[in-house]
Amino acid sequence: MVQIRRMYNIVLYQELESAGVPTRTIRQALRCCLLKLCSGVYSVIAECGLTAHHRIASFIDDRGWTELHEKTPIDELREDYSYLDLLRCLRIRYYPRYREDDTIWGASAAMLHGIPLFGIDSGPVSVAHPRHYSKTSEVHRSTRSVAEEDCSHQAQLRLTTPIRTSLDLVSLRGQRAGFAAMEFVLRKMVLNQLGSPNLRFGYPPEIDRLARGQIVDNWMPAIKRLRTGQATARRMADALDPKSESIAESYCSFNLHALNLRGLQQQVKIYDERGFVSRNDFMDKETMTILEVDGVDKYVKVGRGLMNKESDQHNRLLALGFTVVRFKFKELLNLSTFSAKLFAQAPKLRQLVRVAR
């Protein structure tokens, strides 16, 4: 993204000025064909055809970007999470006033690594610096040092590694969000190690062994470098499962561990006399219980076809004797709400609860 300067038609104020575009014209274009990403950094989003803006249009190299804005109503773009996330990434990537020894960290590093976060806002860029502190509307620079082993680079940017980023999120955004970030990073590492396998037919049998290896070799050293929270991070690392396929599944897994409820397996295939029924998020064979979780706005774009398919799967699971408990995403956000529904609909699961030591 950074190597190709004109991707997304990124243009700096100095470039516009050098091309003879007055400041007044730039301000006017913000209501037309220009989008301000951060101080001194813009994106050309349309070829408006106005004579006064023709010099701005000369910076268009990415036609796909302008076509997106010309064909999609602005209200629809404002509701598109992936579009909003992209704008946040562009603001972080092209912020022009990073200092030497700045390290992007926290939620900002998570954005650049593609780590999913629920409810992320478009606040200032989070930066760590060993000596300086400053806070503006565009950047929050904290005084903290980050070990070289916990740093990575994307083009000219220095940022915390995916592992360190996920560990930092535990204290910054809470244990549930941090756990989901940790599982996402672990899953990506293991799948890369396996050569990005096709999971349509299930998970390779060695996936859990490889995950344990990654945790021992890569996570534990990073945890030892944390100044605080090492015990919590180790406990969470021991509970990670690379088979969580979404932030919702990670939230559910976190809740189950918080309740000391053990024994449920993830991504288990179920069959009946007709053949394959479904691959379920969580299943306990002893109590014949299945847990299914819905992500954010699951049915907004998939339509009624998927709903009918899942209704058929649900009925077949009931016919096999399973108790199926389905959680909406918002029900995963509160442990009390989750626990009350879980044990009300599947009371047999109480026998799996281990006494906390």
Image (cartoon, rainbow, N blue to C red):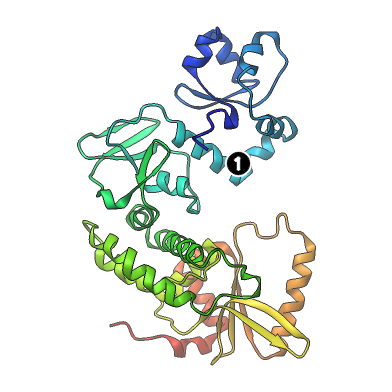
Asked whether the viewer can see residue 236, the reply is no
Residue at image coords 56%, 89%: 285
Residue at image coords 47%, 66%: 190
Residue at image coords 43%, 77%: 209
Which quarter shows the C terminus?
bottom left
| Identity, as a three-letter code, of the amino acid under mark 1 | Tyr
- Relative placement, left or right, of 356 versus 324 is left
Residue 21, position as x, y percentages in the image: 56, 9
| Label 1 Cα crowd, 10 Å radius (few <14 / some 14-19 / many 20+) | few
Residue 19, position as x, y percentages in the image: 55, 10
Residue 126, position as x, y percentages in the image: 36, 40
Residue 252, position as x, y percentages in the image: 50, 70
SS at badge 1:
helix
- Relative placement, left or right, of 34 versus 158 is right
Residue at image coords 68%, 24%: 46
Total labels: the figure holds 1
Depth check: give the residue in front, 152 or 144.
152
Task: Find disc 1 in the rendering and name its residue.
Answer: 83
Asked whether the viewer can see residue 262, the reply is yes
Residue that lies at the very extreme toward the front in this rendered image: 195
- Relative placement, left or right, of 80 versus 339 is right
- Relative placement, left or right, of 136 versus 320 is left
Q: Quadrant of residue 309?
A: bottom right
Depth check: give the residue in front, 95 or 32.
95
**186 lies above or below 75:** below
**15 lies above or below 160:** above
Q: Quadrant of residue 157?
A: top left
